[in-house]
């Protein structure tokens, strides 16, 4: 009896022979054609996809380069503090009247500075341009602050106009280049269409059939369409582009939300009344007339826990300049504490940080912060209730910012104890919906890292949540907390927020490795700390905002 012939499967399986198929048909099994088609599909799929060990090694795609900015801390760090003032009823009334007078006089002096600069065609460069004859100290301070604020607003407006002009010129150059490339392509297309039309007309003259007529009509239609498009491009009608926006007009700066503001004040230590921690003297209020020498206005305050903690730092000193303002019907004082920044520690590694809503903070060491969504809903309900009740109270630090402050302290404390440097998303390069949390966290981390001597790197956040940190591919899937790379040879799966934080860490590591490599010509970009520019001057307390 001859032996049964068997067909070996690529996976090692054994296919039945024809005689076995006939026996299965007799027993009522599936037809051999269907079974053979199924096995052929399986064998073909396995043959087309060999095992990973049998695949030839292919070169990994080159890593993309992202901007990494190393923040350079200043020598001294200013810390802004708000303290509650406790004036008597008469002093509170006088301070309120002075705040209202300051607001009106400041707006009038700003308008005068603007009219004078338009008349002379230049900005007011010094105090000699101000007519201060016969005015008191209070009015002189208002004039000087108004001139400084007007000059700052003018410079900011000029810088904005220059930036918009450069952007418009760059867009025009890009449009001209695009129009030239499009004109060249349409010229070639018109030549091809004319050639096709000539061939179709010649064929139609030789043989007049429905097919040649349709071909000739189509060739003529394509030729006319291409000719009209080329004419539009040459006339500058295509590609259509919106006209550039007109340059913004200069607007006078206005006082910030606390319109009842007195920026000219001085912080003094207690003299006689020892039950107060300090006094704020309103400057320019002691000038009287005739037999009335005038009355100096002193507003007492008490220190709070944050101010005591800042003054307890080595080398910390309280600045003399201060400001007084009303908020929510109460009187507050703005103080500044200058703290020397310690020397930065040498980072032995990098701790990547990612900011989100499902997890407030995710770090590369596996830490996941608190869920921000309930906090955001609670804050929204609180604001809605206040709006329904008609309340106009505002809070400097919301619940969400309180959570981010706690997470920032945890991050800096953990990095300092471990000897690591921090890698954060650059808030200036974030999308709009994420700026509210990342900017606040970045500001707090920059402040605490400077005070703690922790190095800080700001990383370009582009594709940090979509790019695979192992293979560099962007063929990935992210759904809530799930991340998976769909590259053929990768398939990396990880927690989405932890993956983004580790991506930030990998980018900083590659940048530092490239900067310290032998013969390297590139180094990480150095950026001054936001407080470095304010180091040479103490806060003036003008409190202005350009609309």
Image (spheres, rainbow, N blue to C red):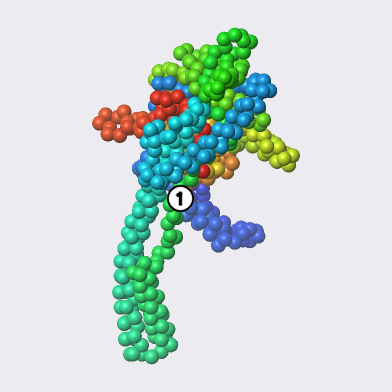
Frontmost residue, 291 versus 495: 291
Asked whether, in this view, residue 191 is left or right of residue 424, the answer is left
Q: Is residue 475 above or below residue 341?
A: below
Question: What residue lies at 40% left-to-right and 21% top-to-bottom?
Answer: 75
Q: Specify whether residue 216 is in view.
A: yes
**Residue 427: where, in percent of width, then height?**
48, 37
Quarter of the image for residue 299 reads top right
Q: How many marks?
A: 1
Question: What residue lies at 49% left-to-right and 26% top-to-bottom?
Answer: 137
Q: Which residue is mark 1?
A: 248
Quarter of the image for residue 301 reads top right
Asked whether, in this view, residue 458 is left or right of residue 174, the answer is right
Q: Is residue 512 above or below residue 546?
A: above
Q: Residue furthest right?
A: 389
Question: What residue lies at 49% left-to-right and 42% top-to-bottom?
Answer: 111
**Residue 407: where, in percent of width, then height?**
56, 27
Frontmost residue, 450 versus 337: 337
Q: Residue furthest front?
A: 290
**Residue 330: where, in percent of width, then height?**
65, 27
Q: Specify whether residue 500 is in view.
A: no
Task: For mark 1, give the secondary structure.
Answer: loop
Question: What residue lies at 51% left-to-right and 53% top-to-bottom?
Answer: 42
**Residue 390: where, in percent of width, then height?**
72, 40
Q: Residues within 10 Å of mark 1 (few under 14, many from 20)?
A: few
């Amino acid at each position: 009896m001859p032996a049964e012939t068997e067909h070996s499967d690529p996976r090692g399986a054994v296919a039945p022979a024809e005689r076995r198929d006939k026996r299965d048909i007799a027993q009522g099994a599936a037809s051999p054609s269907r079974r053979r088609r199924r096995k052929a599909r399986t064998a073909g799929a396995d043959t087309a996809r060999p095992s990973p060990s049998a695949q030839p090694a292919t070169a990994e795609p080159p890593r993309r380069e992202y901007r990494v900015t190393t923040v350079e801390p200043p020598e001294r760090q200013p810390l802004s503090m708000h303290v509650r003032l406790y004036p008597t009823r008469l002093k509170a009334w006088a301070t309120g009247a002075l705040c209202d007078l300051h607001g009106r006089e400041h707006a009038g002096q700003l308008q005068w500075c603007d009219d004078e600069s338009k008349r002379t065609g230049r900005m007011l460069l010094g105090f000699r341009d101000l007519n201060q004859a016969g005015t008191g100290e209070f009015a002189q301070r208002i004039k000087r602050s108004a001139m400084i604020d007007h000059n700052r607003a003018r410079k900011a407006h000029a810088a904005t106009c220059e930036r918009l002009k450069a952007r418009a010129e760059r867009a025009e150059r890009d449009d001209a280049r695009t129009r030239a490339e499009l004109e060249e392509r349409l010229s070639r297309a018109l030549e091809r269409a004319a050639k096709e039309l000539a061939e179709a007309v010649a064929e139609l003259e030789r043989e007049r059939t429905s097919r040649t007529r349709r071909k000739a009509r189509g060739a003529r239609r394509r030729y006319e369409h291409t000719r009209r498009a080329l004419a539009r491009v040459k006339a500058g009608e295509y590609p259509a582009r919106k006209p550039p926006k007109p340059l913004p007009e200069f607007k006078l700066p206005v006082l910030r939300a606390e319109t009842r503001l007195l920026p000219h004040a001085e912080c003094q230590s207690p003299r006689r009344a020892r039950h107060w921690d300090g006094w704020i003297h309103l400057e320019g209020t002691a000038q009287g007339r005739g037999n009335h020498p005038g009355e100096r206005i002193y507003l007492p305050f008490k220190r709070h826990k944050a101010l005591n903690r800042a003054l307890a730092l080595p080398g910390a000193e309280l600045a003399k300049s201060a400001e007084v303002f009303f908020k929510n019907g109460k009187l507050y004082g703005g103080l500044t504490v200058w703290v020397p920044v310690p020397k930065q520690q040498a980072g032995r590694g990098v701790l990547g940080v990612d900011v989100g809503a499902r997890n407030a903070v995710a770090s590369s060491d596996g830490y996941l912060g608190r869920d921000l969504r309930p906090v955001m809903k609670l804050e929204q309900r609180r604001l809605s209730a206040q709006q329904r009740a008609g309340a106009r109270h505002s809070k400097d630090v919301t619940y969400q910012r309180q959570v981010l402050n706690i997470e920032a302290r945890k991050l800096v404390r953990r990095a300092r104890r471990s000897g690591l440097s921090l890698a954060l998303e650059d808030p200036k390069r974030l999308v709009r919906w994420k700026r509210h949390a990342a900017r606040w966290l970045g500001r707090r981390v920059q402040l605490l890292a400077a005070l703690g001597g922790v190095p800080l790197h700001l990383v370009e956040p582009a594709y940090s949540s979509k790019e695979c940190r192992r293979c560099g591919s962007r063929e990935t899937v992210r759904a809530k907390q799930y991340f998976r790379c769909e590259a053929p040879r990768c398939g990396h799966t990880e927690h989405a927020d932890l993956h983004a934080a580790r991506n930030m860490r990998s980018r900083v590591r590659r940048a530092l490795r490239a900067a310290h490599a032998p013969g390297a010509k590139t180094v990480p970009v150095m950026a001054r700390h936001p407080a470095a520019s304010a180091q040479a001057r103490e806060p003036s307390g003008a409190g202005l905002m350009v609309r």
